[in-house]
Structure formats: structure tokens, C-alpha cells
Amino acid sequence: MAVSRLPDALPPHNDEAEMAALGAMLIDKNAADLLVAYLKPEDFYQRSHEEIFRAMLAVAKSSRQIDDITVRAELDVRGKLDAVGGPEYLYQLAEFVPSAANAEYYGGIVRDLAMLRALQEAARQIVTIVHDGELSAEEKADRCEHAVFEAAQKRTSKEFMGLEHLMQEYFLEVDRNLELGEPLHGMPTGFLDIDRMLTGLYPGNLVILAARPGVGKTSLALRLALNAAKISKKSIAIFSLEMSQIELARRLVAMEAGVDSNILKRSRISDEDYHRIADACDRLFKLKVFVDDSSDITHLQMRAKCRRLEASQHDLGLIVVDYLQLIQPITRSDNRAQQIAEIARALKIMSKELNVPVLALSQLSRSVEQRENKRPMLSDLRESGAIESDADVVLLLYREDMIRKDVPGDQIEDVPTATRVVPVEVIIGKNRNGPTGTITLAFQPAFTRFSDAARYE
């Protein structure tokens, strides 16, 4: 089978559409106002048209009206007047269109062709990538998708938001800031003390949540994800490498409904619990939380899936990974520390590329259990010091009640399961943007639910 080559023809463009769009802007203020906001200089294929549009933008930014006189003066100041064809070409553009009624249509042609040129360039990059002998097939797929993603992203834009929704969002922010005492700069976690210390999870940051098995790191991450989805109204991506989608859904319903998670596995449920579960499902249904339970996923596949989610939703706000050590390495190596370092670095790069915080769960090494003081430290991060190095924030969980279970003769108070609340220390071991310290959250094991400790004081 012969390999098809990209055609050597000129990139997609339409000189007449470019002339019509510029001409409409010269003769009509409304057309100028519309297309100044609608188009970008690089949307024009002809260099002279790009320079004319840049001059128009400068005129508009200085609050002057766009016409042949102001644009000619701006081009003259820039030393570009002769290069674009002189005053005569501006007059030609103004005469090219009988009216500006179809200005938006002309601009649409210019913009669409600009996207096609970007896609054509992406296609050329893809051909080069495919023939790169030093890359694996998966790395090639990731880079090819990134090239197309970048080309498509150039055309995304936000839409209007009505005051009704805008004011609701604003007052939610006011209330949060009043409770915190200072404004948030990142994605809210919904936990007052955590938000006070971190001022939210910053876009582009890698946040590590680490603990020994059974302490509650998955429950805390899920509660944080739900809080973020409710408060921000943004899309939340969850990669659950250990727990299936249905298991994760069961846990989300339990914590949202305040129902013992074991009840959800039974064939008989009381009417009261049924209604609480139904109400919880209705609330969860409205949240933009997306779950992927692929157990053999690589960081490249994660990044590709997040790109597609961002391309479809345009509002990706947080990525949760449960958990880091289960991500499949790209590099074949017997050096586990090197593989974990590669994965941690890749998660950091993903957070920066997509400009969202990544919350990655991590196991702690067994060394923490050998010490007399079993509160975890940064050095307990399992298998690689690179996790600490690449992380912007490291949260370490500690439960005294789990330690006491292993102490002979130390009896824990027998509290009914449904009402039992245990304190959990959240140790902020690293915070690149602020202070470190320890805060306490309340955990209800029956519901796998975390809350602010102040609610139970």
C-alpha cells in the first residue's frame, strides 16, 4: 500500500473573503466592532491583510473609529503603509464591498480557513512525528493528538453568562471568602481549613495526597472532587485505577446520602434510606464529574483523555488520579524509582499543559510503621523522592485510631458504626505557594465521608 503524501498546493485561503471582511470594517462601524472581536491577525493569509488588521486593532484599542483615514494614519506610523499597497489599496478595499451586511459571513470564511491552515500544519507535524524512529508508538500517538488539539483549541471561546447565573456564582464566592477571611486563588476544596492554608488548588499545580492503605485517602479525594464540582460548576476528571466505576459510584452515593455504604450492597433498603439515596443520586446527576476506571492506563493515555474532555466541555477544572503507583510506566525498566519519577514528572507536565490542578493519590512506604512516631513525613513517599520534588503541594493523612488498634491493651470506645466520627490529621508537608502545617478533618467511616472538624466540635 502506497503512503499518501500531503499535497504541495497553497494552504487554504480566500483573498476575496479577506478583502471583503476588511472592506466591511472600513465602511461600517458595527462591522468593525464585530470583526475586531471575532478575528485575529493570524487568521489572514495574506501578510498585507494581516498588517492592515493589526492597524485596525490598534485604532480600536485607542478608542478611535476604524475608517480609511485612521487606518492609513496608523499604518503610516508603523511604517507599513507602502508595504500593504499604500492609500490606494485601502480605498480599493472600501470599494470592494457594496455594503457591510454580510460582514459576519466574510469573517466566518476567513476564520474557518485559518483553522484549516492550522490543521494542515498539524498534519505536516504528524507526518514528521510518525516517521520519527526514536519515539514509541504511544508517544507518537500522544504528540499527534497534541498537535491536532492545539490547532482546534485556537478557535475555542467562552459564551455569554446571564446575570442570574453570574450573581449566583459571585455571591457563592463572597460567602466563601467571608468564611475563609481571604480570597481563593485556585480550585476550592470545600474544606475551610484546607482552603485557608492553600487558598485553593492552583491551576498547573501537582498536589499529592499520600497515606497508608485504609486511612481514607480515596474518600477524601472523592469528597474534595464533589465539593469542587459543586462550588466551581466545572468538569472534574477522575481516574480510578483501583476501584471500578460502579464501586466508586456506590461510595459517592454513600457519602452524599449519609447512608452506610454496606446498605447499598443489600437487596433490601428501608424507605427512608431509599429516599435519601434517590435524592443523593439526583444531586450527583447534576454534577459534571467524569470517571475513567481503566486499570492499565499510562500517563500519555490520561493526558489524551483529558485533552478530549477539555475539548468537549471547555471547562476542565480538576483531575484526580487514584493512585499514582498504579499508572503504567512508558519506560521499560527494572528501576521502579525511575519509573515513578517519570510518572510524577508527566503528571506535573499534564497539569501545566491543561492549566488545571492534578490531585494524585500516593502510597506511603512501610517505613512509617516501623517508627515510634507514626505520623508520616515527606521522606515516607513511596519508591521515589521525585514525587516530593515535582509536587507543588503534599498532603499526608494520619489517623490515630488506626494506630491504637495495633497497640495491645488499648481499647477504642465502642461507638455505634453509623454515628462514629474520628479525627484525621491532614499534614501539609509541602506547600510551594504558602505555609505548611497540620489541620484536622472529621471522618465518618460508615459513610466514607469527610467534613470540617468544626461541625462536630
Image (spheres, rainbow, N blue to C red):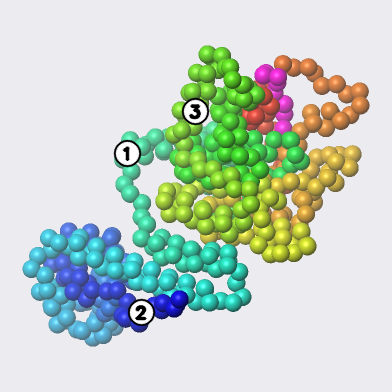
Q: Residue furthest left?
A: 98
The secondary element bearing badge 2 is classed as loop
Crowd rating for badge 2 (residues with CA inside 10 Å; few <14, some 14–19, many 20+)? few
Report the label total.
3
Q: Could you tell me how far apart the alpha carbons at marks 3 and 2 are, in whole angstroms?
A: 53 Å
Could one spot residue 440 in this view of the protein? Answer: yes
Crowd around label 1: few <14 · some 14–19 · many ≥20 (10 Å): few
Of circles 3 and 2, which is in front? 2
Q: Does the magenta stretch include residue 421?
A: yes
Q: In which quarter of the image is the C terminus?
A: top right
Q: Position of residue 303 (x, y in %)?
A: 55, 57
**Residue 342, x across and y down, in percent:** 68, 61
From this view, report whether residue 141 is shown above or below residue 165: below
Residue 275: percent from left, percent from top: 50, 18
Counting from the top left corner in percent of width and height, residue 292 is at: 55, 45
What residue is disc 2 on?
Answer: 7
Q: Nearer the viewer, residue 174 or 368?
A: 368
Residue for point 34% across, 66% down: 115
Query: Is residue 102 placed above or below 173 in the rendered structure?
Result: below
Magenta stretch holds residue 232: no
Q: What residue type is labelled 2?
A: Pro
For the residue labelled by badge 1, is the local secondary structure a helix, a strand or a loop? helix
Label 1 vs label 3, nearer the camera: 3
Specify start and end residues of the magenta stretch as a single range.
417-425
Q: Identify the residue position indicated by label 1 in the image.
A: 163
The residue that appears at 62% across and 56% down in the rendered structure is 298
Residue at 19% across, 84% down: 86
Image quadrant in which you'd find residue 117: bottom left
Q: Circle 3 sits on which residue? A: 281
